[in-house]
Amino acid sequence: MSALVKNIMEKMVEDKLEQMLPGLNCCKCDTCKTDILCYSLNRLKPKYVSTEQGELLSRVDSVSIPYSTAIMTEIAAAVEIVKKNPHHH
């Protein structure tokens, strides 16, 4: 298999989390950020691409309101879960 398959939802959620983080009332350590990212990604539909063009088109699509709202909703839910059950010391 020569094509690289990539789930660009990871980068989309990571970018949105970084944008939202300053306004979130939660721990911002790397462990908590990773837990928030994982929780969110496990609840969002993956978005796979195999070409650069596909990635660019998907990124343009990702700024649409349904994608953006879904990502922000899952991040907000993840923050609440991680705040109640932090894995850091």
Image (cartoon, helix red, strand yellow):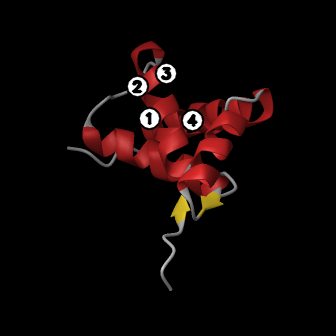
At x 53%, y 53%, the residue is: 52
Quarter of the figure with residue 61:
top right
Labels 1 and 2 touching (C-beta < 8 A): yes
76 in relation to 20, above or below: below
Q: Which of marks 1 and 2 is nearer the N terminus?
A: 2
Q: Is residue 35 above or below residue 73?
A: below
Q: How far apart are marks 2 and 4 (CA)?
A: 12 Å
| Earlier sequence position, callout 3 versus callout 2 | 3
Q: Is mark 4 on a helix, strand or loop?
A: helix
Image position, residue 86 (x, y; %): 36, 43
Tag 2 secondary structure:
loop
Which amino acid type is marked by label 2?
Cys
Rounded to the nearest whole Å, what is the CA distance between mark 4 and mark 1? 12 Å
CB-based contact (under 8 Å), mark 3 and mark 4: yes
Q: Name the residue under label 4.
A: 75
Say the numbered circle drawn on residue 20.
Answer: 3
Residue 14 in the image, given as x and y percentages of width and height: 45, 39
What is the distance, in whole Å, between disc 3 and disc 4 at their CAs?
9 Å
Amino acid marked by disc 1: Lys
Residue type highlighted by circle 3: Met
Q: Where is residue 62 in the image (x, y as percent from the top left)?
A: 68, 37
Badge 3 density bin: few <14, some 14–19, many ≥20, Cα 10 Å: few
Distance CA(mark 1)–CA(mark 2): 6 Å
Location of residue 37 in the rendering, given as x and y in whole percent from the top left corner: 46, 45
Mark 3 or 4, nearer chain start: 3
Distance from the alpha carbon under mark 1 to that under mark 3: 15 Å
- Mark identifier at residue 83: 1
